[in-house]
């Protein structure tokens, strides 16, 4: 039997306890953070070394067995959903910080290291790793590379791709590559950027050299309430238009404010239609000056209430509500579905109105929390999985939000990846030419298509079956399409 | 005859004056900024529209004719060197700024637009385009994308890849693609980064959407002289270690200081072994504070003389010498050859000593000018092309410098690209696995290898013939190799 043969061969590479194949052992791996999709793999493997990974991949390549990589399993788009006929390759045991170079401001880490563990390890040098996904306590840096994760600070400090300099990868045939380098640029095609965000489809990352940056001397937060979402959206544009790049620029709508204030008592204005949190970090003088300018812009933009954090405790309290928005959703609703689309900042009001309309249409509430500075929306659709048909309605509602983002000239993902979740919307976002190019790139790395099959890039056949209409250039050419 | 057939067919696409094939018409296109390499193409075409480009590429594809794209021809690595059996595709006539969106801080421009022309066009909105190669008066944005160009401000503001959001490209078979988007991230593989710096090997860029940033309120410059290059190198590390990311951080060595001061009278200290120029930009308060901190660090780092620009005229005067370093080289020597390698900052002193040793060995003077903040060296080897064998010695000397950069854990290009110039050093920088992957990516875009053949990525055969030894991970694993 094929499974037994696979297990036997894997056990020649790994200790017995690192090869799981009984259903009860496989269960914990049946989904990632997107629990609406579940599947059991044939086998889960838990290698400890790069050498073991090379042998596992060589074996899977020889046996033509699909391989799905998994970090901490916190991903929100189903990128680590197992393949029922494949091996789930957990990178959790590769969790060493290999080297820290405080002079060069870099650290070499294995893929299973938790995001926050890097900052903790380098804090002694006054350094930290900037990208901070909400899940940073748990999520692994390898997963961050696979999804090109962001966080509240990515407006100023960039996504994962902007904060890594070098990758060691193993290809499906076991070949090792080293891509990128410590220089600002690197010769040859930019395979580092190509790998980043490729959702485990091109190769397996076995070591990451991350950039570290000095901890800012000071951080301070302005919290501004608005009686109108449009005014809040304009305030965001005004801050950025003034040449300020805030360390964070977050928006919450009324339903979110109420949901979090109820549990957190962060001091949010319950009368507000929207609240902006705008952070400045840097040297003390720089922050004092920037906060002054932000305050003035919020005033000019019609804020009804503005507070500036007076100390670190207050800054953290202001943030607490925003950071607890997802758990708060879990407390006001049995289930919630977190979406992730990006739109040009100027279309914010239109899209929020569109979401409100869809919310009524589908009879489902939606909390809006977002990285306003870069137009990255995180609508949280509230639903009850125990109500027949509600999950399906939620998925449809979510799909419509993503399509609306594309129509507004935006994109279907800000930082969570495509995975299984948004694969149909890829047919709307991209045309035949772009999809063909994605498949050609995939084939260059993985000609047999064994790495994470079925994720991230839909087949042309799938798009044809869906009859999805590709939107070329968003609003520019489709001004006649329904506006929301 | 094949040429006549090609010309006839091209004339069905373009007006007669846009198809050049007489030797005297081809001559101006025989080289780019690296004039040591020259070749005449079969034909030069000068299309005006994307439609014409599509038809030209379809024709070349059908006739299996190589195509080399050319912007302004200011490149320094021979990336636009014509193919003797191919078409040289000049993008100079596509020179329109298509749209400016001051709210989104973006501009859509055609590839032939000059780098500086973008900043000039958007100045009215208080915006500018950050990457500023030395050639920015002349070089085109399309060429900047092809080479992933930098400039003195790229330490703070990034390379071209960090300052563009979207590309329209035409593939060799005429297929049009639109890659990237206005969001911070984009779904699918990162083809935008892959195209950027791909030296015309993957596709032809027909439109670029660039990011614009607000002009800083103030810029100020600290000029510090050191009696020792190592102290200057340490000062660079100290500034960056203090969490300051200067808008520019440039170093010049003694021979450069003397060469430029002679002609420019920028006020450089002729007794100095090295001079650092360190610029701060931002709001007035931020700059005042940062300049104070930079000044203190220069003092602590042992600077023998420190001046701070008192006004804009003085700031520009301090810069004038650095900006005139290349022309100054041309005044102290009949010819000069500008190299472009990048090293980890901490290896600066070692590499400078190594260059000095090579300079004696080859009997050729070398001026050292560099973007010190990001370790990007621009050694200028001074030679006389009229002396038999001197060009060959210069090329060999240059090659050794690049190999030394690799041994120091760096890379062979900072911002000029590989082109023809550094193709042999690619064999030293990369192993078989990486080179094979580059070829696989190339084949995914251009299966017949018609776009800019022979540039940027050497064949494995070439590397084998050279007998070049690939240096894996630079100094880390090859500590036993000769140190300089």
Image (tube, coloured by chain):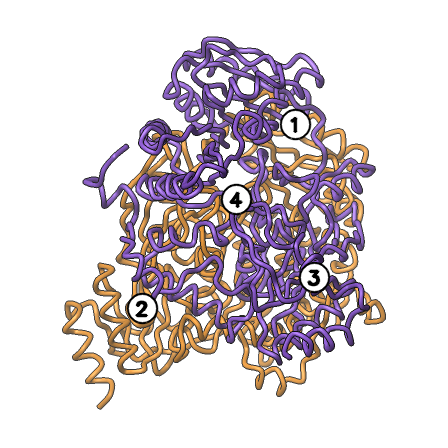
Chain colours: A orange, B purple
3 or 1: mark nearer the eye:
3
Q: CA distance from mark 4 to mark 1?
A: 25 Å
Q: CA distance from mark 2 to mark 3?
A: 42 Å
Q: Is residue A63 left or right of residue B34?
A: left
Say whether mark 1 and mark 2 are on the same chain.
Answer: no
Question: Can you identify the residue that label 1 sits on?
Answer: B282
Question: Can the viewer see residue A140?
Answer: no
Please, what secondary structure does the residue beneath circle 1 have?
Answer: strand
**Residue A428: percent from the left, percent from the top?**
66, 74
Q: Can you say whether B225 is above or below A101 in the image? A: above
Q: Which mark is residue B148?
A: none
Whichever of callouts 4 and 1 sits on the residue coming sooner in the sequence is: 1
Say whether mark 1 and mark 3 are on the same chain.
Answer: yes
2 or 3: mark nearer the eye:
3
Q: Chain of mark 4?
A: B
Q: Residue at x 50, y 69 (%)?
A: A419
Q: Quadrant of residue A380?
A: bottom right
Please, what secondary structure does the residue beneath circle 2 have?
Answer: strand
Q: Chain of mark 2?
A: A
Q: Which mark is residue A89?
A: 2
Q: CA distance from mark 3 to mark 1?
A: 33 Å
Residue, far right: A480
Q: CA distance from mark 2 to mark 4?
A: 38 Å
Question: Can you identify the residue that label 3 sits on?
Answer: B206
Question: Can you identify the residue that label 4 sits on?
Answer: B415
Please, what secondary structure does the residue beneath circle 4 have?
Answer: loop
Q: Residue at x 30, y 59 (%)?
A: A92
Q: CA distance from mark 4 to mark 3?
A: 22 Å
**Residue A81: percent from the left, percent from the top?**
42, 72
Whichever of callouts 3 and 1 sits on the residue coming sooner in the sequence is: 3
**Residue A80: percent from the left, percent from the top?**
42, 68
């Amino acid at each position: 039997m094929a499974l037994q043969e696979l297990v036997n061969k894997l056990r020649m590479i790994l200790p017995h306890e690192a090869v799981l194949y009984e259903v009860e052992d496989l269960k914990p791996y049946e989904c990632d953070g997107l629990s609406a999709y579940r599947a059991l793999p044939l086998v889960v493997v838990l290698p400890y070394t790069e050498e073991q990974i090379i042998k596992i991949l060589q074996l899977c390549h020889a046996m033509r067995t699909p391989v799905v990589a998994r970090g901490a399993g916190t991903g929100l788009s189903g990128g680590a959903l197992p393949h029922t006929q494949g091996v789930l390759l957990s990178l959790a045991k590769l969790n060493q910080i290999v080297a820290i170079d405080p002079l060069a401001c870099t650290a070499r880490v294995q893929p299973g290291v938790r995001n926050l563990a890097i900052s903790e390890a380098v804090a002694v040098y006054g350094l930290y790793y900037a990208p901070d996904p909400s899940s940073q306590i748990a999520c692994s840096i390898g997963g961050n590379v696979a999804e090109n994760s962001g966080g509240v600070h990515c407006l100023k400090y960039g996504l994962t791709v902007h904060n890594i300099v070098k990758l060691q990868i193993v290809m499906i045939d076991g070949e090792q590559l080293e891509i990128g380098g410590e220089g600002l640029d690197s010769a040859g095609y930019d395979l580092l950027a190509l790998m980043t965000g490729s959702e485990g489809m091109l190769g397996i990352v076995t070591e990451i050299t991350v950039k570290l940056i000095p901890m800012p001397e000071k951080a301070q937060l302005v919290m501004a309430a608005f009686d109108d979402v449009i005014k809040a959206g304009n305030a965001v544009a005004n801050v950025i238009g003034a040449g300020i790049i805030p360390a964070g620029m977050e928006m919450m709508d009324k339903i979110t404010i109420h949901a979090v204030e109820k549990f957190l008592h962060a001091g949010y204005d319950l009368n507000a239609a929207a609240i902006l949190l705008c952070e400045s970090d840097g040297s003390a003088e720089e922050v004092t000056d920037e906060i002054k300018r932000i305050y003035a812009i919020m005033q000019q933009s019609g804020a009804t209430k503005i507070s500036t954090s007076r100390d670190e405790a207050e800054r953290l309290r202001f943030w607490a509500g925003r950071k607890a928005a997802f758990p708060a959703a879990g407390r006001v609703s049995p289930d919630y579905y977190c979406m992730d689309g990006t739109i040009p900042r100027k279309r914010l009001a239109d899209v929020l109105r569109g979401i409100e309309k869809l919310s009524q249409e589908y009879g489902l509430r939606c909390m809006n929390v977002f990285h306003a500075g870069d137009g990255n929306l995180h609508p949280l659709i509230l639903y009850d999985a125990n109500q027949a048909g509600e999950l399906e309605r939620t998925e449809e509602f979510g799909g419509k939000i993503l399509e609306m983002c594309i129509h507004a000239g935006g994109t279907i993902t800000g930082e969570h990846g495509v995975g299984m979740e948004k694969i149909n919307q890829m047919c709307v976002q991209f045309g035949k030419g772009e999809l063909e190019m994605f498949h050609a790139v995939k084939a260059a790395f993985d000609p047999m298509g064994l790495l994470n099959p079925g994720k991230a890039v839909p087949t042309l056949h799938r798009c044809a079956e869906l009859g999805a209409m590709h939107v070329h250039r968003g609003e520019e050419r489709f001004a006649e399409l329904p506006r929301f």
